[in-house]
Image (cartoon, helix red, strand yellow):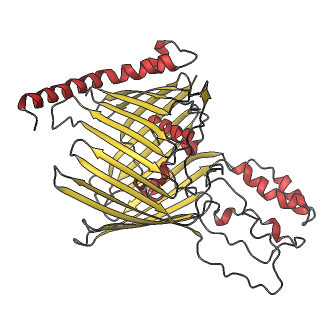
Amino acid sequence: MPSEETKERIIKVVEVGRTVMHYGWIPFIIYVGYTRSSPQPSLIKLISPLA
Amino acid sequence: MHPFASYVLRSYYKATGWNEDNLYSNFTRSSSSILDFTVPRGLHFSISKSPNALFKTTYSMNALPSLNGSIGYIFTSCDLNVKGSGDVRFKDMVDRFRVYDQPRRPEGKEEVWLAGERVDTRDYLLYGRFYIPTGRLDALYSARLSGTMQGMIAAISDPRPLPLGASNLMLSLQHDTGRTCTEYTWSADDSMWGVRFLYNFGKIGTALESPGESEQLSTPVQTDRSEVKRVDEEEAMEGGLKGRISAGAEVYFSAREKSAGVSTGIRFTTLPDATAPSFQPPDPSSSPLSLSSSRTPHLPQPPTTITALFNPMMGHISGAYAARVSRDLSVCSRFDLNVYSYESEWTMGAEWWLRRKPVLHEEDTLDAKSSDENSPDHLTSAPAMSETWTDDVLGVVKARASTTTDVSLMWEGRLRNMLVSLGIVSNLSSRSKPIKAVGLELAYFSSG
């Protein structure tokens, strides 16, 4: 069995990972879309459908 | 109407050759497309754009009763030819009754080798949607692991405290071989494990056949019947519906919640080349000049799907019958019964396609009729007429009524370049408030 300290550390890591995913997921998709697309569109076109 | 994101997801499956209809979770799709349509409530607007073939952006806003919105981004590794809302095939955008094609083993991407190394990458899809003002995030990652395997990770992350914001992570692994399809799922919220399995009896389509749509008008297959029969050979008795049978089951259990469940189902569906009786193109072999076995009449059978589901633990039985009775009308009826409580529900529904009047010149048909009956022109005139009918759909009207819930009516169609969905839910037994909800949904998307 892992000790209490390890458990707490795991919970903390999971929590941080969740926060990173929550705020980083959409920028990550835009980044992937921006770098993998050819021809590379302007960034504003990727972010907004109205542009 | 499908939201733009699910339209893109379907296009992605189509482009990568993944058959989502072979999953047990989509077992009753034919009947639920007629009976379980979602009526929009309030006002919904969505505007989407694909700046290039790989990337899509979508904004949506809901007004009435409360104002909220969301922004979504989708990236796919393969080119998707997503059209604009003005020229997209209308039938691709709505849930509708279909007889699904024969399942076939999905094929992976062609291997690309460069200097002794495999350089092709596996196909994947990234999707994220952020809700305003709640701050909720929906995320999806789907990857084709091999020709017959697909993995999926879906997550909901809600920063609000627990009773409001429920976060979850779901993993799913799908393995489709055409004959069988297995799906393993795990959900983090309640540590629920699940296995879904589907088995197709009978003939399986080969991978080489192009996956044609069941609905496209196919002339009856002539090859089998064109064999010249012996004089004394007896005709096979033809009757009933011809089709294929699938059976499936689902098992799920959660150690944390100490709960489990089982569901089983069986489905009969007619073969995809069945056409509606009123839309049967004349059989050329019925010509007196034909030497083939013209005595065998081609029995028309309406495209039909019959499903039965049984959940032994909950004691729930559900049987549904859906058929396209004419070119424009599909009807469905479903009976649900709980064997423990005798609670029952009978639901009936229909979808009716509205079309433009066929672009046909009256004189042409008259000319064809007045000409020699046996001339080849006459024989081909009717199928030619049917071709002009195929893709001039104006919209669809769906209606649903059941013994327990409300009566729902919905119209979906296209106004200029916008897709419109208008729905009403009413409760006819309540005199004080006969109309429960009204909704309007407008969607516009473009490419380039």
Question: Please, is residue B366 above or below residue A12 in the view?
Answer: below
Q: Is residue B277 left or right of residue B323?
A: right
Specify the quadrant of the image occupied by residue B71. Answer: top left
Q: Can the viewer see residue B434 in this picture?
A: no
Q: Position of residue B389 (x, y in %)?
A: 70, 50
Percent position of residue A11, x then y: 15, 30
Q: Is residue B150 visible?
A: yes
On screen, B33 above or below B45? below
Q: How many marks?
A: 0
The residue at 44%/42% (across/down) is B150
Residue at far left of view: A4
Is B279 on the left-hand or right-hand side of A13?
right
Q: Nearer the viewer, residue B77 or B95?
A: B77
Image: B18 above or below B125: below
Residue shown at 33% from the left, 62% from the top: B263
Where does residue B399 sit, x and y in percent of width and height? 45, 56
The residue most toward the bottom is B232
Residue A50 location in percent, x, y? 48, 19
Is residue B409 toward the left or the right of residue B379 in the image? left
Q: Quadrant of the C terminus of chain B?
A: top right
**Residue at position x 55%, y 48% in the image:** B106
Closer to the camera, B163 or B421?
Answer: B163
Q: Nearer the viewer, residue B228 or B443?
A: B228
